[in-house]
Image (tube, rainbow, N blue to C red):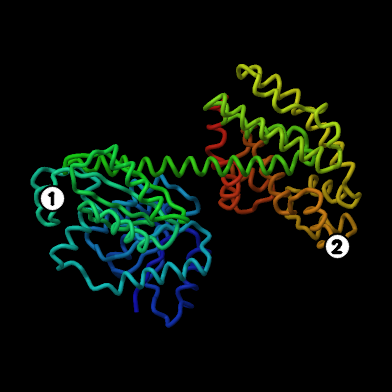
C-alpha cells in the first residue's frame, strides 16, 4: 500500500481526492494526510514521507512549486502531481526541472484521477535506481542539472558517467497528450539510428539530448520530418534548441521549451479564432447588435495586427460564409450579389479602408440577419429568447425558459438546434460572457462580483469559462484590451 498526501486550500477538492483514493480498486493507496497551506505541506511531507503528493499550486504561504523545490532533492523518489484550476503552461519552466510526474487541471474527473493513479503505480513499482551507476546520473542530469549552467568539472563528470561522445549537444522537447512513454520511446529509437541520444519523460513531455556536433539547420529539418512521420495522427508540439557546449546546454533546453510553447500558443490562438467565428455565425441576428459587433471585432482585430493581405483573405471567406448563412439558408440567394460583395475586400488598401468598409457592410449584415432570422423564428422561441435575455444573471435552466414559452424542454431544445444551430447552454454562456466583458470594461466591480452578476456562483469556474471563450482570464482581459487600444 502506498501513502498519499493531498495539498489544496479548497475543502471540496480535499474531500473529493480523499473519496477517490478510498474507492480506488484493491485500496492500494492510503491517505497520509491533508494540507491546506505550504507550511503545513512541508511539515507533513517531512513527518509522513508519502510516496505520492497531489500539490495545488496556488496555496496560502509558500506556493506549491516552492514546496516541491524545497523537498524534491531530499526525497528523489517521491512523486509529485500538480493540480490547479487553470492551464498555465508558463509554469513548465519551473515545474519540469523538478521532475513533476503529471499536471491535472481541476475539476478532475474520477476517470482521469484513476488513470493517473495507474501511471503512478507503474512508476512506484519500478525498483529504486539510486544505486544504478548509469540511471541515477542520467535522471539527475536530465531532470535537474541540464536546466542550469554547469561548471566544467561537473560537466566532465556527467559526460564520463553517461558516456557522451561529444562535448556539444542539442536538446529536443516533445509534448504529447497521452501515451507519452510509448511515443517518446519510438522517437528515441528513431534518433538512435543516426545519433547518440539519451532521454527522459517529465510532465507529459519528452526531453532528448543528442550528443553530437551536428549541423543545426539540417538536423532541425530532418528531426521535425521524423517527428511528423513517427507521430502521424498523434497530437503533439515540439521544439529544438541550439547547439551548445556541455556547460551551456541549459540554453538549448530553454530555447526548445520556448519554441514548443510558441507552437502551442499559435494552435490555441487558431482554435479560439475558429470558435469565435462559429459563435459569430450562430449569433448574428440573435444577440443584441452591440454584442454581435464586439464579437465581430474580436475576430478581425487580432488578424489585422499581423498580415494585412492574409487578414483580407480571411475576411473575404468570413463575409462569404455570413452572406450565405443569412441569404442562402433562408431561400433568398437570388439577390445575394446585390446585398454584399465580399471580393471587394481585396481592393482595400489600408486599415482605415477596412474599418470604413466593414462598418457599413457589417451593419447591412446585422439588419438583414435580424429581419430574416427573427421573422423565421416560431413565437415560442422568441418568447424563450426574451426570457433568457432578461434572466441570464439568475440560475435559469432550459426548463424555466420552456415553461415561460409554454412548451416542453425537449421541444425548445429542438428549436434551438433548428433555428439557432446552437443549444441552450451555449446561448446562455454567450450572453453571460458578453455581459461580463462589458462589466469588466466599466471597471466598477471585481471578478467575484461580476461572476455573481452574470449567473456564476463559483468565481473559479467563471474564470475558466471566460478564458475558454475570450482567450484570457478576467484579470488579464482588461489589460489586453487596453494594450490593443
Q: Position of residue 422 (x, y in %)?
A: 74, 51
Q: Position of residue 183 (x, y in %)?
A: 37, 60
Q: Residue at x 66, y 17 (%)?
A: 353
The quarter of the displayed image where residue 322 is located: top right
**Residue located beneath label 2 in the image:** 408
Q: Are marks 1 and 2 in contact (CB under 8 Å)?
A: no
Q: Residue at x 39, y 76 (%)?
A: 30
The quarter of the displayed image where residue 49 is located: bottom left
Q: Position of residue 463 (x, y in %)?
A: 57, 47
What's the mark number on residue 220? none
Lower position in the chain sequence, tag 1 or tag 2:
1
SS for tag 1?
A: loop
Q: Residue at x 72, y 35 (%)?
A: 292
Left or right of 256? Residue 421 is right
Rounded to the nearest angstrom, the CA distance separating label 1 from label 2 is 73 Å
Quadrant where the image shows the C terminus: top right
Which mark is nearer the camera, 1 or 2? 1
**Residue located beneath label 1 in the image:** 165
Classify 10 Å Cα crowding around label 2: few (below 14), some (14-19), many (20 and above).
some
The quarter of the displayed image where residue 242 is located: top left
Q: Give the answer, above or below, for where 192 lies relative to 295.
A: below
Amino acid at each position: 500500500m502506498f501513502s498519499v498526501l493531498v495539498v489544496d486550500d479548497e475543502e471540496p477538492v480535499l474531500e473529493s481526492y480523499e473519496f477517490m483514493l478510498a474507492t480506488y480498486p484493491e485500496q492500494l493507496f492510503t491517505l497520509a494526510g491533508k494540507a491546506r497551506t505550504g507550511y503545513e505541506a512541508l511539515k507533513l511531507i517531512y513527518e509522513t514521507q508519502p510516496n505520492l503528493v497531489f500539490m495545488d499550486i496556488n496555496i496560502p504561504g509558500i506556493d506549491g512549486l516552492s514546496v516541491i523545490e524545497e523537498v524534491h532533492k531530499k526525497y528523489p523518489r517521491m512523486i509529485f502531481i500538480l493540480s490547479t484550476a487553470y492551464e498555465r503552461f508558463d509554469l513548465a519552466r519551473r515545474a519540469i526541472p523538478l521532475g513533476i510526474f503529471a499536471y491535472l487541471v481541476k475539476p478532475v474527473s474520477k476517470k482521469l484521477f484513476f488513470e493517473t493513479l495507474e501511471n503512478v503505480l507503474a512508476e512506484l513499482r519500478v525498483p529504486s535506481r539510486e544505486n544504478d551507476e548509469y540511471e541515477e546520473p542520467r535522471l539527475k542530469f536530465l531532470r535537474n542539472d541540464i536546466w542550469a549552467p554547469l561548471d566544467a568539472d561537473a560537466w566532465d563528470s556527467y559526460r564520463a558517467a553517461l558516456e557522451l561522445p561529444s562535448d556539444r549537444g542539442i536538446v529536443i522537447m516533445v509534448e504529447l497528450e497521452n501515451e507519452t512513454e510509448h511515443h517518446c520511446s519510438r522517437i528515441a529509437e528513431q534518433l538512435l539510428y543516426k545519433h547518440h541520444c539519451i532521454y527522459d519523460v517529465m510532465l507529459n513531455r519528452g526531453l532528448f539530448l543528442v550528443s553530437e556536433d551536428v549541423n543545426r539547420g539540417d538536423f532541425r529539418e530532418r528531426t521535425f520530418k521524423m517527428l511528423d512521420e513517427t507521430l502521424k495522427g498523434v497530437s503533439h508540439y515540439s521544439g529544438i534548441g541550439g547547439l551548445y557546449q556541455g556547460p551551456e546546454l541549459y540554453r538549448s533546453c530553454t530555447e526548445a521549451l520556448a519554441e514548443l510553447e510558441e507552437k502551442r500558443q499559435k494552435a490555441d490562438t487558431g482554435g479560439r479564432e475558429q470558435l469565435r467565428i462559429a459563435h459569430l455565425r450562430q449569433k448574428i441576428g440573435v444577440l443584441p447588435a452591440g454584442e454581435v459587433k464586439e464579437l465581430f471585432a474580436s475576430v478581425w482585430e487580432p488578424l489585422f495586427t499581423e498580415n494585412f493581405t492574409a487578414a483580407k483573405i480571411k475576411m473575404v471567406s468570413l463575409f462569404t460564409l455570413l452572406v450565405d448563412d443569412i441569404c442562402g439558408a433562408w431561400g433568398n440567394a437570388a439577390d445575394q450579389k446585390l446585398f454584399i460583395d465580399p471580393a471587394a475586400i481585396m481592393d482595400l488598401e489600408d486599415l482605415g479602408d477596412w474599418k470604413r468598409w466593414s462598418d457599413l457592410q457589417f451593419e447591412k449584415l446585422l439588419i438583414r440577419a435580424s429581419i430574416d432570422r427573427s421573422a423565421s423564428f416560431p413565437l415560442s422561441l422568441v418568447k424563450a429568447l426574451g426570457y433568457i435575455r432578461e434572466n441570464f444573471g439568475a440560475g435559469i435552466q432550459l426548463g424555466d425558459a420552456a415553461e415561460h414559452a409554454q412548451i416542453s424542454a425537449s421541444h425548445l431544445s429542438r428549436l434551438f438546434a433548428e433555428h439557432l444551430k446552437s443549444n441552450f447552454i451555449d446561448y446562455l454562456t454567450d450572453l453571460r460572457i458578453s455581459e461580463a466583458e462589458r462589466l469588466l470594461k466599466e471597471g466598477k466591480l471585481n471578478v467575484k462580483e461580476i461572476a455573481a452578476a452574470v449567473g456564476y456562483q463559483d468565481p473559479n469556474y467563471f474564470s475558466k469559462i471566460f478564458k475558454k471563450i475570450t482567450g484570457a482570464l478576467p484579470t488579464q482581459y482588461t489589460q489586453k484590451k487596453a494594450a490593443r487600444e
